Image (cartoon, rainbow, N blue to C red):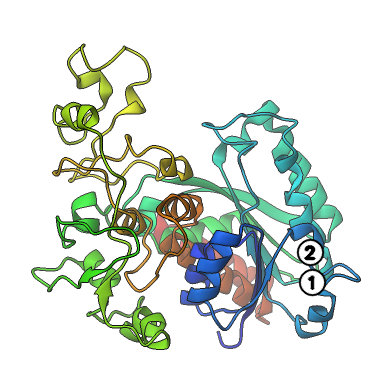
């Protein structure tokens, strides 16, 4: 489907945007408040108009983006992930956290731009808090904005090629005048099921071709030569061409910077001697509760974790910028690097992160994995196609039933 236009909110460093562009959309505008994430976004998406500021100001009268409205007509998709710390299982889980209401800015812009569809990403805990109170509150506000045909789907990133067991809640809906003739929830689930991989990608597949040696922050390493590459590594590497990640896209930023092909962001935090002694006792895939008693106090077994090379990673967290003890390399006695964390999120090697090492890890942990975002974007295309078709309701229902039958095989 040609000419699909999208706008991004709460864009972070650009993982969601990367996937939506891979799905065939043109992202026209984006909003990000964090100046470090905005720097990374701006470098990797030089053609996207970016508001580096508060989403509260986006497209409001008398704001610096008020004039953008005339260029943002006939939008097909509004997407974004409002900050989720107030809902997160590992966060405060404070129902009064002011960040819980940031979704309202997304809904405000949705009512302003009136795109055909929206995607809003958040943590799955949001669906459970206060017995589903926030879920119903959000759906109510979406109805008031003209999107009564909305649903929520829980997705696992590993199902869509991301080597990570990251689960997210995705609100998805269509504008009230877009007639599907079929149940949206069924259609969304059927199209997503079509794009699931046959198996989950492992940590070894994600980072096995990267060098053992690391560099200092801000420095680069020679790009590692290819050797017995798996499918995922071919997706990620600068020297390979794939349908999903074309070589030209992966090398575009380096060309614009007139930079040589190199391995960027392959650095990590220093490790103290006492911590090094501890992680040497961690076997692949094991947690703190496998350590000798002299190393573990019996609390929080997830405090120390060595990645399992033969399984997907556990969820990559923004909190890893403070402490990487949950992300010990699967075979080496060190933390994973920024680039390895990026691979676990499915960022290709041409996507370069800026700011301090602390900020880079935070950006990666907060991001929507590009390959998951791509699957969501492809799903949106298919739903729009059904809504735009002139076929009868009966035919549309038959098409969805066919998709469901295929997905259940």
Answer left or right for 235 relative to 282.
right
User: Which x, y percent locates residue 142?
Assistant: 78, 54
Report the disc number at residue 109. 2
Task: Name the quadrant of the N terminus.
Answer: bottom right
Task: Name the quadrant of the C terminus.
Answer: bottom left
User: Which x, y percent locates residue 55?
Assistant: 74, 59
Q: Sort mark 1 into few (<14), some (14-19) or many (20+) by Cα contacts within 10 Å.
A: some
Residue furthest to the left: 227
Structural distance between the alpha carbons of marks 2 and 1: 6 Å
Disc 2 element: helix
Tally of numbered discs: 2
Which residue is rendered at x = 16% and y = 28% of the image?
Answer: 277
Q: Is residue 134 above or below residue 177?
A: above
Residue 402 visible from this viewpoint: no
Residue furthest to the right: 61
Q: Is residue 254 above or below residue 94?
A: below
Q: Is residue 90 above or below residue 199?
A: above
Which residue is rendered at x = 82% and y = 84% of the image?
Answer: 70
Residue that mark 1 sits on: 113
User: Which x, y percent locates residue 168?
Assistant: 51, 47
Residue 395 visible from this viewpoint: yes
Report the disc number at residue 172. none
Label 2 close to label 1 by CB (< 8 Å): yes
Which residue is rendered at x = 21% and y = 42% of the image?
Answer: 334
User: Which x, y percent locates residue 21?
Assistant: 51, 76
Q: Sort mark 2 into few (<14), some (14-19) or many (20+) by Cα contacts within 10 Å.
A: many
Between 216 and 34, the one nearer to me in the picture: 216
């Amino acid at each position: 489907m040609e000419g699909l236009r999208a706008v991004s909110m709460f864009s972070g460093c650009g993982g969601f945007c990367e996937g939506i562009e891979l799905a065939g959309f043109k992202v026209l505008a984006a909003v990000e408040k964090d100046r470090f994430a905005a720097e990374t976004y701006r470098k990797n998406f030089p053609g996207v108009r970016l508001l580096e500021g508060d989403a509260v100001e986006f497209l409001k009268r008398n704001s610096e983006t008020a004039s953008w409205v005339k260029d943002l007509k006939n939008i097909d998709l509004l997407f974004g992930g409002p900050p989720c710390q107030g809902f997160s299982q590992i966060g405060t889980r404070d129902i009064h956290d002011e960040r819980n209401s940031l979704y309202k800015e997304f809904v405000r812009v949705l009512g302003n731009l009136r795109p055909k569809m929206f995607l809003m990403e958040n943590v799955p805990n949001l669906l459970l808090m206060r017995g589903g109170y926030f879920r119903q509150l959000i759906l109510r506000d979406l109805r008031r904005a003209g999107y009564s045909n909305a649903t929520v789907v829980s997705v696992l990133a590993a199902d869509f090629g991301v080597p990570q067991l990251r689960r997210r809640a995705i609100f998805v809906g269509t504008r009230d005048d877009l007639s599907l003739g079929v149940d949206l929830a069924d259609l969304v689930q059927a199209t997503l099921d079509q794009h699931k991989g046959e198996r989950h990608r492992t940590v070894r597949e994600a980072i096995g071709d990267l060098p053992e040696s690391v560099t200092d922050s801000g420095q680069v390493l020679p790009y590692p030569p290819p050797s017995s590459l798996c499918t995922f590594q071919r997706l990620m590497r600068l020297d390979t061409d794939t349908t999903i990640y074309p070589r030209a896209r992966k090398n575009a930023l380096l060309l614009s910077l007139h930079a040589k092909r190199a391995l960027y962001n392959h650095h990590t935090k220093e490790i103290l001697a006492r911590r090094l002694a501890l992680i040497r006792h961690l076997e692949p895939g094991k947690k703190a509760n496998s350590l000798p008693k002299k190393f573990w106090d019996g609390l929080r077994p997830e405090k120390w974790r060595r990645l399992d090379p033969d399984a997907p990673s556990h969820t990559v967290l923004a909190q890893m910028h403070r402490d990487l003890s949950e992300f010990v390399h699967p075979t080496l006695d060190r933390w994973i690097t920024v680039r390895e964390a990026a691979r676990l999120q499915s960022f290709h090697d041409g996507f370069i992160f800026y700011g301090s090492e602390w900020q880079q890890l935070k950006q990666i942990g907060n991001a929507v994995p590009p390959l998951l975002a791509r699957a969501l974007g492809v799903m949106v295309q298919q739903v729009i196609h059904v809504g735009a078709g002139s076929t009868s309701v009966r035919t549309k229902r038959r098409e969805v039933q066919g998709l469901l039958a295929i997905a259940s095989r």
